[in-house]
Image: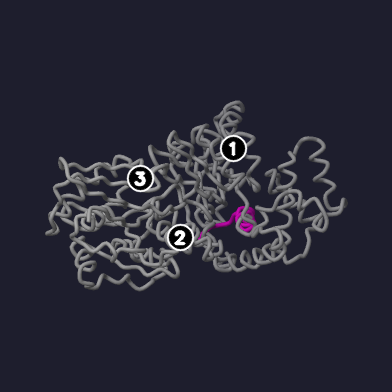
Amino acid sequence: MGYAKVLSVGLAGVAGHLVEVEADLAPGLPAVIISGLPDTALHEARDRVRAAIVNSGQKWPNRRITLNLLPATLPKYGSAFDLAIALAVLAGSGELPPVALDATVVLGELGLDGAVRPVRGTLPMVAAAARAGHTRVVVPAGNAAEAAVIPGVRVHAVDTLHRLVAHVRDGSPLLAPPAHVPACGPAGPDLVDVAGQPLGRRALEIAAAGGHHLALFGPPGAGKTMLAERLPSILPELDDEAALEVTALHSIAGLLPPGGGLLRRPPFQAPHHTATVPALVGGGSGLARPGAVSLAHRGVLFLDEAPEFSKGALEALRQPLESGRVRVARTRGATEYPARTQLVLAANPCPCAKPSGDVDCECPPLARRRYLGRLSGPLLDRVDVQVRLTAVRAAELLSTDAAHESSATVAARVVAARHAAADRWAATGHRVNADVHGPYLRRPPWHLPARVTTDLRRRLDTGSLSARGYDRVLRLAWTIADLDGRDRPGHDDVAEAIQLRTGEVA
């Protein structure tokens, strides 16, 4: 028989597409031709596959081999098709019975010695196979744990091409995936370590409860970084849907911890201020890779020393913050990644960054305005909570009082507030207050009476708040009410929300 077909999966962003790897062996001058829009790594598969087959003790067919990857109009990337190509060639040459591979999806990269090596994106590829109705998959042993988290799929692991060939020929057993162990990761820093800063703690708790973006301004040593790093510790664990999304993104990026499994902790990304636009929002040649804003999906993206980031990188975040998605367009197509993250900005008040702040600052007023002016108005308009921290006092830093609340204590209140918001907005499909569309908040039954929003409406009329800012203050007010156990925000809740939004001190 000169024809065989093996199923595999290709990725376009986080979406997987079933790919049929066809092999046709015909008389003629020995050659290998690959069609179906392969990239460079896939073009080089001909050499890897040939060496792997020979070094696994199999015979390489000296015929004209045409390999086609269907659908031919979908670009194919990476080395995950190596194993499927090898099986298709061996089945087409008559070395393997092709019927044994029917309805089986095969993934894996081949080494020259025939070893099957792990590939990125195994989890979303297996999920795509399951959606297409294929419940039997063969994956590299190093990817078996992450593949096994997809329900309803029988996962078979292989470490060498020789083992898989023996299984297809005589039914010898393949490797079983390891027992499922949740990939929780190490526990992060605790909020109990933060000295003083009651305003910063309150802002952090409100941001966590409502899913709001947060900006922290203050002198060095005030605790901006400490607070931001502890935000994930008070966020709820990811549910199944969110955990699958986050784990798939980290699988594509090759960042899953050893052992695979679903990531249950909200991710935390803190790129350096020299990060480029592609590093933040995604990019690269060929298949665009997820950037930091997507790797922080359902978690926290922390930009320390935010004014030091390039203007282009900061402005590139505006659209993802609004829509919760990143769409990276390239000449060969567009790639879309989810990017629903909480942004945390931290900035010193001026370039000299004297620890005592305004007291010893040597910067002229124009330099101070220019420094913070690097954070554009449209970007800050998307940040719900903007607070200015003061330097920590000696009494606060050296206090032995154990009254500081731990992350676990604060997290319990955050969970209760999120449950209240989720119950309230269940009919709209929203889960946190920060995601609720403004028109819902300005119409019955959620419209607040005029006596509650008098100051807010005055600020809108005078131009000190934009229409977007008006809605964001309302969202903050609802979050404050949820944290304090009230059904609806009152005048004091709106007043505190205005202070948090504008950075004013009560």
Label 1: few (<14), some or many (≥20) within 10 Å? Answer: few
Q: CA distance from mark 1 to mark 3?
A: 57 Å
- Do the numbered discs 2 and 3 sit on residues whose CB atoms are within 8 Å? no
Q: Earlier in the sequence, mark 2 or mark 3?
A: 3
Residue at mark 2 = 132
Q: Secondary structure at mark 1?
A: loop
Q: Secondary structure at mark 2?
A: loop
* Picture coordinates of residue 195, whole percent (x, y): 54, 57
The disc labelled 1 sits on which kind of residue?
Val
Region in magenta: 193-206
The question of residue 201 being in magenta is answered with yes
* Picture coordinates of residue 469, whole percent (x, y): 71, 43
Which of the 4 image quadrants contains residue 137? Answer: bottom left
Residue at mark 1 = 359
Q: Nearer the viewer, mark 1 or mark 3?
A: 3
Residue at mark 3 = 77
The disc labelled 2 sits on which kind of residue?
Ala
Question: From the viewer's perspective, is residue 97 above or below residue 497?
Answer: below
